[in-house]
Amino acid sequence: MAKNPPKGSGRKGAVKGRSQVKNPKTDRWVKRDRATGQFMDQKSDGKPFKGVTSER
């Protein structure tokens, strides 16, 4: 039987050009742009972003 393709970009693997780091004060994960170093987004729950590389 035929299968419809996934919606969206159809990404497989890690997101490119992004990284994430945990903020120890707020205990939340923050997404960062690797090129500019600017913070982009913050998770509301305590779980990390899916498919985004973690920094040390």
Image (tube, helix red, strand yellow):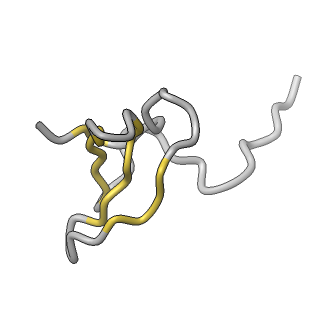
Residue positioned most to the front: 25
Q: Residue at x 29, y 62 (%)?
A: 17
- Residue 23 or residue 32, whichever sits in front: 23
Q: Residue at x 47, y 35 (%)?
A: 50
In the picture provided, is 45 more to the left or to the right than 7?
left
Residue 16: image location, x then y, percent: 32, 56
Q: Residue at x 17, y 41 (%)?
A: 55
Residue positioned most to the right: 1
In the picture provided, is 29 more to the left or to the right than 24?
right
Does residue 37 lie above or below 26 as drawn? below
- Residue 52 or residue 1, whichever sits in front: 52
Residue positioned most to the top: 1
Q: Please identify the quarter of the rendering in which residue 33 is found.
A: bottom left
Q: Please identify the quarter of the rendering in which residue 1 is found.
A: top right
Residue 20: image location, x then y, percent: 30, 46
Does residue 55 lie above or below 27 as drawn? below
**Quadrant of the snapshot with the C terminus:** top left
Q: Residue at x 28, y 71 (%)?
A: 38
